Amino acid sequence: MRTIQDWRPEDTQFWEQQGRKVASRNLWISVFALILAFAIWQVWSVIVVKLPLIGFKYDSNQLFWLAAIPALSGATLRILYSFVVPIFGGQRWTVISTASLLIPAIGIGIAVQNPDTAYSTMMILAVLCGFGGANFSSSMSNISFFFPKKEKGGALGINGGLGNVGVSIVQLVV
C-alpha cells in the first residue's frame, strides 16, 4: 500500500492537478467498504428474527440480547475506531477493518445451519457484527483527511449516506 507523502487539499493547484482524483478514488472505495460494513452490522438483526423459524429454541430475552449486542459493540468500538486511522493509515485500516467482517459473515453462515449452536457462540457472533458499525467512525475519519474544507461536507455526506445503503440491502436480501 502506498503512503501519501505530500497532501495539500487546500492548495487549489495541487487539488485540481492530483488531489481530487486521489480523494475521489478513496471516497468510492470507502463507500463500498462502508456498504459492506453496514450490511454485516445489520444482518444480525434480520437473522435474529428468523432464528425461531429455523428451529432455534431461544426465548424472547435471549433474542432481545442477540439483537441488541451488535449495536452495543459497534457503538463502543466506534470510540476506538475513530483514532486508528492516523495510527495505521486510512487505506490499510480500511482493508483490515473490512476484511475483519469476514469473521462474522462466515461464522453466521456456519452457525445458522445447526439449531443446536450454543447461545454463547451466537453472542460472540453478535459482538463481531458490531465491527461493521464501528467501521463508520474510521471511514468518516479517513475521508475527512482527503478533502478540502469547502468539499468535506459533501464527501462525508456521500460516504455516510451511500454507506447506509448496506442496511437496506440486507433488509431486502435476507
Image (cartoon, rainbow, N blue to C red):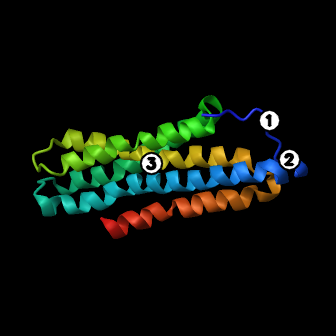
Q: Secondary structure at mark 1?
A: loop
Point out the residue furthest to the top here.
87
Measure the C-alpha gap from mark 1 to mark 3: 31 Å
Using the image, determine if residue 58 lies above or below residue 141.
Answer: below
Closer to us: 106 or 73: 106
Kind of residue indicated by mark 3: Gly
Q: Which mark is residue 6?
A: 1
Q: Secondary structure at mark 2?
A: helix
In this picture, residue 111 sits left or right of residue 84: left
Residue 9, how many percent across, how many down?
81, 47
Q: Quadrant of the C terminus?
A: bottom left
Residue 143, how many percent across, how many down?
66, 48
Q: Quadrant of residue 91?
A: top right
Residue 63, how many percent across, how many down?
24, 54
Please name the residue shown 21% across and 39% down the image. Answer: 120
Q: Secondary structure at mark 3?
A: helix
Could you tell me if residue 70 is visible in this image? yes
- Marks 2 and 1 in Cβ contact (< 8 Å): yes
Kind of residue indicated by mark 2: Phe
**What crowding class fits label 3: few (fewer than 14 Cα within 10 Å), some (14-19), or many (20 or more)?**
many
Provide the residue designation for mark 3.
132
Provide the residue designation for mark 2.
14
Kind of residue indicated by mark 1: Asp
